[in-house]
Every structure is written in C-alpha cells, then in structure tokens.
Amino acid sequence: MRALRILLIVVVVLGGLFVIADRLAVNFAEGEVADRLKASGSMNTDPEVTIHGFPFLTQVVGSGLEDVEVSVKEFDATTDGKSVRVADLTAHLRGVEFSGGFSQATAKTAEGTARIGYADLLKAAKPDPIDVAPGVTAKVIGLSDGGNGKIKVEIEAEVFGATLPKPLEVLSTPTVQDGEVRVKADALPSLGIKVAEDKVREITDFQQKVGGLPGGIALSKVAPAKDGVEISVEGSSVRLAG
C-alpha cells in the first residue's frame, strides 16, 4: 500500500512537471510564431498568438499544430503605396506545419474576420469635389451603416456656387472582388438637373484594396456594421514564415 501511494505521488509530480514544461514550451512557441509573422512583413504591429490544443509537446513531435489563433488590434494593409487601417483582425490557422524552429510555417487553412472603420474606408473615395456637370460639383463626405446590408453614403453638392443645404444620401452595396472592398450605389442621387450616370458614379462608387495579409489569405466577403465594414478572410496553404 505504501509503495502504491509513493507511485501515485510520483505520477502526480511528474504529471505536474509535464504540464509546466508543456505550458512553458507553448508560451515560447507563441512568441516565436508572433516574431516570425511580424518579421515576414505581413504586419507592422505585434500580433498576439494563441496555440490551442493540449498537450502542445506532442504536436511539436509531429511538427504540426492543430489550431493557431492570431489577433492583431490594428495594422496598415498597404498595396501599391496606398494603405488602409485594418482593425480587430482575428484569424484561426489550422493544420500548421513547421520546420527549422518555426523559421518555416504553413497553415493548411485559415479563416477570420476584421474591420475597416468608415473613416478609413472614406479615404478610398475621391477627396476633392468632381465636376459632374457645368456648374455642378460633388464629393463624398461621410459613410455610415445604412441597415439591411447597405452603406449610407453622404454627398455634398454645389450647384452654381451654392452648396445644397442638406447632404444627398444614397444606399450602396459593398462587395468583395479581386482583393478589393467595392462600394457601388444602388441608385444615383438627384442633383436637380440631368447628369450623366458615369460622372455621378465617379463620386458614389469607389474601391479599397486590402493588401499586407499573410500569403494565401484573401478577402471573402464584406458586411456593413455600426462602426465600419466587417470583412471575412479565408485561405489555404497560408505561408506564415519562410
């Protein structure tokens, strides 16, 4: 009986030491993955990395991680010298295979969400008034949630030197195409005179490229929300490092 009690104590102690070693190892690995992600140039702020699954050490032996969660409070997604601030990015990377002490890592699949504030998305619209007809200029001055999956676009117009007392409003549908968030007016605002549709759409319709994401991740869909547009991302064979 005494020998059994001693054996149980040894098992408990060893089990505790294994858990401690496992947690220390996972904390080290999370730091390494975060450093690799930042060093890859995909993000210009420090990401938070959480490796799910227990025990971690058995995953290391197999050189693969079941689920890695990456969170970034905000970063600048830059494409062709133009950038947009992306906030609250959270992505789950599954089936992460690594080698060389995390110097190379690739996830089989990835999916996540992020947000672009309306103030940041507004920067994609033309900032200066556009001549839409003789004596008539207009520009977008505000974006907000229009309800029912629409973005409300506010337009300031000036007719023969007089600014209209109230901004014009149109509802627009956001879509994702070719890595861009595109905003297209469902119907054009009335300016009181006949104006060519293509001239008005130079104001109401615009697009914002979202770059700087890890290789293999792309935009999949977009939906308006209270403080900005919520974007979904997904991908396969996502390169995290190397």
Image (tube, rainbow, N blue to C red):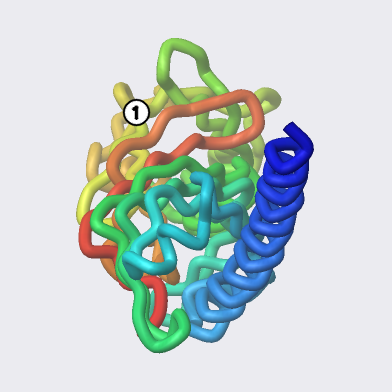
Residue under the image location 69 percent in, 45 percent down: 7
Q: Residue 75 is drawn in which quadrant?
A: bottom right
Q: Using the image as rendered, state which of residue 142 and residue 175 is in the foreground.
A: 175
* Secondary element at tag 1: strand
Residue under the image location 35 percent in, 74 percent down: 98
Q: Where does label 1 land, which residue?
A: 173
Would residue 148 be visible to someone looking at this image?
yes
Q: Quadrant of the C terminus?
A: bottom left
Q: Amino acid at mark 1?
A: Thr
Up/down of 36 relative to 116, above or below: below
Horizontal and vertical percent position of residue 213: 41, 65
Up/down of 25 relative to 156, above or below: below
Would residue 192 be visible to someone looking at this image?
no
Q: Quadrant of the N terminus?
A: top right
Q: Is residue 167 left or right of residue 2?
A: left
Q: Using the image as rendered, state which of residue 95 and residue 142 is in the foreground.
A: 95
Q: Is residue 148 left or right of residue 121?
A: left
Residue under the image location 52 percent in, 18 percent down: 146
Horizontal and vertical percent position of residue 141: 62, 42
- Residue lying farthest to the top in this orientation: 148
Q: Using the image as rendered, state which of residue 100 and residue 214 is in the foreground.
A: 100
Horizontal and vertical percent position of residue 178: 21, 56
Q: Using the image as rendered, state which of residue 126 and residue 90 is in the foreground.
A: 90
* Count of numbered circles in the view: 1
Residues packed near mark 1 inside 10 Å, few (<14), some (14 to 19) or many (20 plus): some
Horizontal and vertical percent position of residue 158: 58, 41
Up/down of 150 relative to 132, above or below: above
Q: Residue 84 is drawn in which quadrant?
A: bottom right
Residue under the image location 41 percent in, 46 percent down: 203
Q: Is residue 90 left or right of residue 79?
A: right
